[in-house]
Image (spheres, helix red, strand yellow):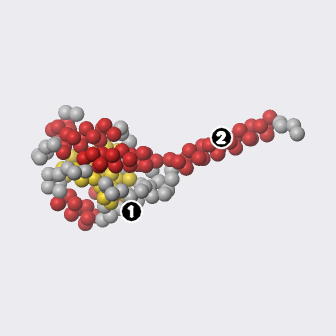
Amino acid sequence: MKITKSRALMGVAIVAAALVGGQWLLTHSTAPIPQSTLMRSVTSEGQLDSIVAGAGSKLLVFDLYADWCGPCRTLSPRLEALADTYGATVGFYRVNVDANQAIASAFGVSGIPHVVFVKNGKAVTSLTGLYPREAYEKIITACAQTSGSCEKILSSL
């Protein structure tokens, strides 16, 4: 059997498509991000209001994500690790933006992942996109250690 140049190229194209498709599936899965025991899910505006009102001066971290978002899937274990480290003094929460569009709107989400840091009842800063663990940790350590506002501390970072 003689393989022609066009058949060889077609074979290469099929293999390349399979590899690219496999990579796409790894980063664009629609399976839900696993639930966490360290990060509680927020499912309503009323629940969000109750969490913020009851936190006092405790720092709260809200991860706004979607199940289909590859960077959100990458961020999830980073925030889980931070919740494991700082969970005794910082509240960690997840909000699925597809299921809670009103909450996403209230936080001003324009892209995901979007992590909002709330202190004393108001958002003090947020990060949109995927950052190294150290970026989130720097904000957490700066804000969690003060009982007052952390905006001045954050502006010096």
Mark earlier in primary sequence (2, 1): 2
Disc 2: which residue: 16
Q: Position of residue 57 (x, y in %)?
A: 14, 51
Helix, strand or loop at mark 1? loop
Disc 1: which residue: 99
Q: Quadrant of the C terminus?
A: top left
Per the rendering, the mark at residue 67 is: none
At a point 34% along the width and 49% down the height, the residue shown is: 80
At a point 19% along the width and 43% down the height, the residue shown is: 143
Q: Nearer the viewer, mark 2 or mark 1?
A: 2
Residue 136 image-quadrant placement: top left
Q: Position of residue 129 (x, y in %)?
A: 37, 43
| Residue 41 as seen in the image, left or right of residue 150 | right
- Between 27 and 155, the one nearer to me in the picture: 27
Please indicate, yes or no, whether residue 102 appears anywhere in the rendered image.
no
Q: Position of residue 66 (x, y in %)?
A: 41, 55
Q: CA distance from mark 2 to mark 1?
A: 35 Å
Please indicate, yes or no, whether residue 146 appears anywhere in the rendered image.
yes
At a point 30% along the width and 65% down the height, the residue shown is: 44
